[in-house]
């Protein structure tokens, strides 16, 4: 038989989930403890409403539903230590709020009701409250990790969009600040490109290729009874009459640019010529006379306006002849302007019968008319034919034709199967055909390919389309702006992610204290139950076992 002292030292192990039932079964708490506990909590709610909150900071952290035995005991101690709330009556009982909370504490301690409350809170915290807080923290942490992943992906996409935009602008020679105007400005490089094309086509190799192809056609395909039609006629015409290098935008592009200029308050480069400008200059006869009178100093004395009917018959005949010539000939600009002024119905003639003291004419006056005429000619210079698709296609047809011919000749000259036949044909061919072999045809073919490349490369075609097609210009501008806007949208989404991250971090910072407070309260209640039960069983050690020990040991502060 065991010694009673040894039995007294044996621990009592109680599963936390069955602690309430264990206390009722052993009659350590009454069976109606829940009813009595609800009565105590009702009293707590009424007393909490009149509790002086400003007495202690601890009171500000409480609410009526969270006050249990341990909180009520702490409130009682604070009120007891307070000089205003610790007065006693003649019977030795506390008065005021301290006495009310003393009664609450005694109600908890009567029949060990506080143990039933503690068992209830332990089960609720271990099974529900603490796991919920842990899941909330894990969820927030996962969302933060997802935000980090999204941020990295968005930054990578934004950098990729920025690099694509920069590459597209670099290919077109743009800075990327004002895409529409910069695209028009890049058209200034077309004259230099057209100049390179014409320079290549005027090279000796191209001339040799034309000559070789023409002589070969004459030798191989000429019928003595028929006249040979000229070959490569479009290419010959270009070499004989080189096209202008002057480039301008088309009318629909000009209209679009003017509309965009009004909307954005921006202007084009004044040094860049634009076709189809309506100068809208009108001036009536009275304005002409007034401007002549007020602005021009003829330095020949005064003049008077007389009736045109007083002019001599010879002058009228000359005027009529000039007017007829004006209708038939549009090239005599100076005569036309004079005749139009003199043939107006309302304008009055000028009497030139004036005296001139000096017949010397200033040299600068003589040079003014030619200078103005030259300026007008440059302003309306003919638009380059190379901007026309049909004209370029005709040139390309001839170039591809001669390229195919030269390539076929090289294949025949280098083929081992036909080399003997080629030698026989070459021997009886004219000298103009014998002087060409595979070695000197290679550079000629290279120049032909270079000319084709200059005419067909993407940048040249895009620049031509920019000048010719408003739809292409709008589509190109939209494509570039979409890349830039995509980057901007991605950058803006980073701000939204920052706001969301701040919200999650705030949520996480508030969840940690809640979890730690629940774990700390669970630990205190466990110790309270173990110490109280140990005193009931004559000091035998009592251990509350189960999942509760794992939960309270998971605290980050443990």
Image (cartoon, rainbow, N blue to C red):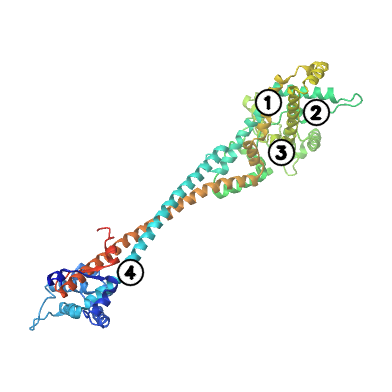
- The CA distance from mark 2 to mark 4 is 98 Å
CB within 8 Å, label 3 to label 4:
no
Would residue 372 be seen by someone viewing this image from the given angle?
no
The x, y position of residue 445, in whole percent, is 70, 25
Q: Quadrant of residue 128?
A: bottom left
Q: Give the mark, 2 or 4, whose residue is nearer the N terminus.
A: 4
Q: Give the mark, 1 or 3, whose residue is nearer the N terminus.
A: 3
* 4 vs 1, front mark: 4
Q: Does dot 2 land on a helix, a strand or a loop?
A: loop
Q: Is residue 540 left or right of residue 264?
A: left
- The residue carrying mark 4 is 127
Nearest the eye: 85 or 5: 5
- The residue carrying mark 3 is 389
- The residue carrying mark 1 is 447
Q: Residue furthest left?
A: 90
Q: Quadrant of residue 461?
A: top right
- The CA distance from mark 2 to mark 1 is 19 Å
The x, y position of residue 427, in whole percent, is 81, 16
- Is 450 located above or below residue 481 in the figure? above
Q: Give the mark, 4 or 1, whose residue is nearer the N terminus.
A: 4
- The CA distance from mark 1 to mark 3 is 22 Å
Which residue is depicted at the point 66% across and 32% down? Answer: 453
Nearest the eye: 312 or 289: 289
* 2 vs 1, front mark: 1
- Is 141 located above or below residue 298 in the figure? below
Near mark 1 (Cα within 10 A), the count class, few <14, some 14-19 or many ≥20, is some
Q: Is residue 136 left or right of residue 156?
A: left
- The CA distance from mark 3 to mark 4 is 81 Å
- The residue carrying mark 2 is 231
* 2 vs 4, front mark: 4
* 3 vs 4, front mark: 4
């Amino acid at each position: 038989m065991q010694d009673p002292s040894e039995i007294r030292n044996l621990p009592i192990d109680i599963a936390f989930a069955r602690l309430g039932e264990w206390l009722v079964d052993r009659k350590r708490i009454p069976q109606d403890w829940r009813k009595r506990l609800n009565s105590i909590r009702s009293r707590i709610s009424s007393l909490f409403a009149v509790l002086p909150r400003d007495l202690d900071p601890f009171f500000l952290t409480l609410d009526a539903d969270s006050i249990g035995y341990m909180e009520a005991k702490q409130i009682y101690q604070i009120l007891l230590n307070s000089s205003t709330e610790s007065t006693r009556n003649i019977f030795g009982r506390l008065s005021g709020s301290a006495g009310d909370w003393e009664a609450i504490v005694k109600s908890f301690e009567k029949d060990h009701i506080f143990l039933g409350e503690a068992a209830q809170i332990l089960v609720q915290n271990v099974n529900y409250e603490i796991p919920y807080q842990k899941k909330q923290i894990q969820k927030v942490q996962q969302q933060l990790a997802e935000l980090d992943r999204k941020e990295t992906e968005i930054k990578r996409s934004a950098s990729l969009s920025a690099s694509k935009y920069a590459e597209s602008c670099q290919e077109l020679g743009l800075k990327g600040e004002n895409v529409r105007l910069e695209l028009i400005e890049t058209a200034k490089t077309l004259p230099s490109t057209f100049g390179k094309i014409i320079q290549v086509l005027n090279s000796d190799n191209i001339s040799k290729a034309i000559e070789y192809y023409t002589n070969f056609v004459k030798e191989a395909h000429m019928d003595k009874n028929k006249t040979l039609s000229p070959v490569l006629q479009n290419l010959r015409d270009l070499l004989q009459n080189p096209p202008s290098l002057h480039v301008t935008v088309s009318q629909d592009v000009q209209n679009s640019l003017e509309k965009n200029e009004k909307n954005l308050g921006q202007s084009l480069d004044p040094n860049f010529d634009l076709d189809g400008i309506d100068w809208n200059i009108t001036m009536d006869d009275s304005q002409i006379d007034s401007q002549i009178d007020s602005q021009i100093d003829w330095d020949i004395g005064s003049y008077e306006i007389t009736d045109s009917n007083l002019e001599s018959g010879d002058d009228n005949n000359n005027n009529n002849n000039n007017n007829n010539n004006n209708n038939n000939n549009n090239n005599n600009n100076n005569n036309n302007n004079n005749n139009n002024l003199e043939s107006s119905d309302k304008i009055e003639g000028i009497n030139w019968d004036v005296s001139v003291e000096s017949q010397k004419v200033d040299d600068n006056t003589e040079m003014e008319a030619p200078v103005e005429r030259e300026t007008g000619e440059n302003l309306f210079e003919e638009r380059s034919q190379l901007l026309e698709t049909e004209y370029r296609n005709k040139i390309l047809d001839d170039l591809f034709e001669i390229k195919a011919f030269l390539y076929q000749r090289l294949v025949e000259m280098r083929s081992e199967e036909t080399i003997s036949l080629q030698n026989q044909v070459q021997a009886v061919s004219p000298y103009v055909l014998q002087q060409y072999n595979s070695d000197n045809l290679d550079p000629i073919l290279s120049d032909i390919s270079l000319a084709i490349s200059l005419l067909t490369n993407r940048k040249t075609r895009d620049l031509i389309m920019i000048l010719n097609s408003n739809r292409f210009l709008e589509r190109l501008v939209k494509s570039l702006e979409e890349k830039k806007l995509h980057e901007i949208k991605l950058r803006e989404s980073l701000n939204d992610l920052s706001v969301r991250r701040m919200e999650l971090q705030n949520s996480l910072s508030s969840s940690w204290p809640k979890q730690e407070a629940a774990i700390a309260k669970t630990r205190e209640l466990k110790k309270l139950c173990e110490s109280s039960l140990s005193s009931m069983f004559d000091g035998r050690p009592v251990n509350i076992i189960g999942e509760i020990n794992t939960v309270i040991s998971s605290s980050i502060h443990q």
